[in-house]
Image (tube, rainbow, N blue to C red):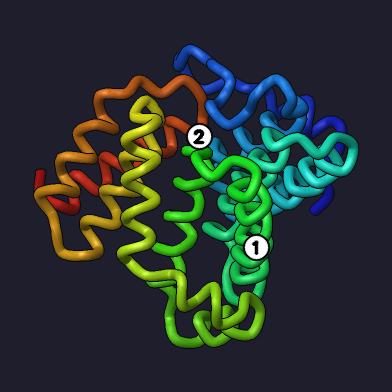
Amino acid sequence: MTITTTMLAAAVLALGGVEQKRPEWATEAVPDTIVTLVERAADTEDGDLRKELLREAERHAREAVAADDQTNRRYALAVVLGLRANVEGGKTKVQAAASLSDELDVILEREPDHAGARHMLGRLHAGIRRMGRITRWLATNLMGGDELSRATWETAEANLVYAEEHAPHVADHHLQLALLYRDTGRPELAAEEVSHVLDIQPHNALEQAVLDEALRVRSELGQ
């Protein structure tokens, strides 16, 4: 599938009555096309289309970084790579995660206290801990043993907690911490973080997806 100009035009930021606001990660330095593609990917139930939209978003994000290597643009690329790692499978998932790791290394070398990058690093480490045996074998070969050894539940939690404390207005910071607490056997803390997500009004498709996931987790926790 190829993303055409017509498809891009159709991917306008519109989300069933929710007042739209530019996502937290999309500063003015981030081209609108990237934002539109990511939002459209978050708003579709078609898995194949979602993957194609995110691949196209990655292409535009890489072009933006090549044109002007700003940290904000690199972080937008990291966000896209993180989303790709979530929806892809097997070797492609690991390749996206490896690319994400590379981008985060650059960002955090420039800005060690970048809350968004710390959040993404926490998500990456938690994701590695959740990998199955075969995927972890691929990760060992593509990402290297050092990255895998750094990926512990403790490092994931430390980074996610940092992001949640320094940017508590971002709903996904609470959601990812809730998922980590759930997966490490602390349902009460998970429920508390889910409640924080529910207190934040979504303003775009990606934030609505975070809210939807939080509602699913709340139900799973029996809340």
Quadrant (top left/top right/bottom left/bottom right) for the C terminus:
top left
Look at 41% across and 23% down and name the residue there.
202
Name the residue type under label 1: Ala
Q: Residues within 10 Å of mark 1 (few under 14, many from 20)?
A: many
Q: Is 187 on the left or on the right of 198, as rendered?
A: left
Question: In this orientation, which residue lies closer to the viewer: 126 or 144?
Answer: 144
Return the mark for residue 85: none
Residue receiving disc 2: 206
Q: Are marks 2 and 1 in contact (CB under 8 Å)?
A: no
Look at 31% across and 39% down and name the residue there.
174
Q: Position of residue 219 (x, y in %)?
A: 18, 47
Question: In this orientation, which residue lies closer to the viewer: 109 or 37?
Answer: 109
Question: In this orientation, which residue lies closer to the viewer: 206 or 109?
Answer: 109
Q: Earlier in the sequence, mark 2 or mark 1?
A: 1
Secondary structure state at the residue bearing disc 2: helix
Please identify the residue farthest to the right as the structure is shown.
67
Residue receiving disc 1: 96
Q: Is 137 on the left or on the right of 35, as rendered?
A: left
Q: Is 66 on the left or on the right of 105, as rendered?
A: right
Name the residue type under label 2: Leu
Q: Position of residue 36 (x, y in %)?
A: 69, 29
Secondary structure state at the residue bearing disc 1: helix
Q: State how far apart marks 2 and 1 are (Cα).
A: 19 Å
Look at 66% across and 39% down and name the residue there.
76
Q: Residues within 10 Å of mark 2 (few under 14, many from 20)?
A: some
Q: Is 194 on the left or on the right of 140, as rendered?
A: left
Question: In this orientation, which residue lies closer to the viewer: 82 or 110?
Answer: 110
Quadrant (top left/top right/bottom left/bottom right) for the N terminus:
bottom right
Q: Is residue 50 visible?
A: no
